[in-house]
Amino acid sequence: MPRSFACLIAVLVTIATATGVAAADVKVMISAGFFAVYEELGPAFEKSTGHKLVTTRGPSVGDSPEAIPTRLSHGEPADVVIMDGSGVDLLEQRNLARPGSRMPLAESFIGMVVRAGQPKPDISTVDALRKALLAAKSIAYSDSSSGTYLSNVGFKKLGIADEIAGKTRKVRGPPSGEPVAAVVARGEAEIGFQQVAEMIHVPGIDFVGTVPSEIQPPTLYVGAIPANSQQPDAALALLHFLSSADAAAVITKNGLKPLPPH
């Protein structure tokens, strides 16, 4: 057993012993950006604690009926949410999350991809990114937080929102949709933007890089306990596990930046 995995098991045993929580079904709502980390570490959590993770996927924000704030607003039950921090802001504003339950898990960045084998535009500076966008024949972005930011703020900061409006496309993400990178891989968009973690493992694309810091919003993936949670202790145990120091390697591998453990 690799040392890192053994350490994770030890963390889980400590959490389970400290909380003394009986095994339960834990309803998790999660957005795409942290899903790969959750999917990899979830089975260890289940095995060591006896809890069963019941997972529902949806975007952190946006107008989709699958968006997590929309689901909770309609009374859909959840014990824990894992999503972009801006989505948790919405939950707190609508009294859909328990006060003080927010727990940062990882930092995320917006990146760009092209179809595999195609030239990679220079996006290392604001001017270079602007030129790349103006030169592109088609641009795709997500219907969640990164795409909402780019369409409402980022492209306007670059001063080209009107010029590129006719060649942009918003892509609906999982569960009913797909990553932006999949659209680019099929050649349906020349370049695509989304959180790095949501694109780097999609086949058929080449990762270009992250957008410049001037256009990069501060983005954290965050866990929180919904107001209607029936298993808050088990949910909190999951969040402590996912934010532990021994989860950092999995977080890094999946295109995110670990934060100091809680």
Image (cartoon, rainbow, N blue to C red):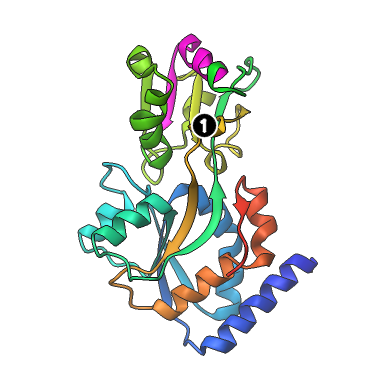
Q: Nearer the viewer, residue 261 or 171?
A: 261
| Quarter of image, res 167 | top left
Q: Is residue 2 left or right of residue 112?
A: right
Instruction: Answer whether residue 131 is magenta in the image.
Output: yes
Q: Classify 10 Å Cα crowding around label 1: few (below 14), some (14-19), many (20 and above).
A: few
Judging from the image, what secondary structure is the residue with disc 1 in?
helix
| Quarter of image, res 55 | bottom left
Q: Residue at x 46, y 11 (%)?
A: 134
Residue underneath mark 1: 214
Q: Residue at x 26, y 58 (%)?
A: 93
Give the magenta range: 128-141
> Does residue 196 appear anywhere in the picture?
yes
Q: Nearer the viewer, residue 209 or 63?
A: 209
Q: Nearer the viewer, residue 77 or 126?
A: 126
Instruction: Answer whether residue 46 is magenta in the image.
Output: no
x, y percent for residue 64 = 28, 43
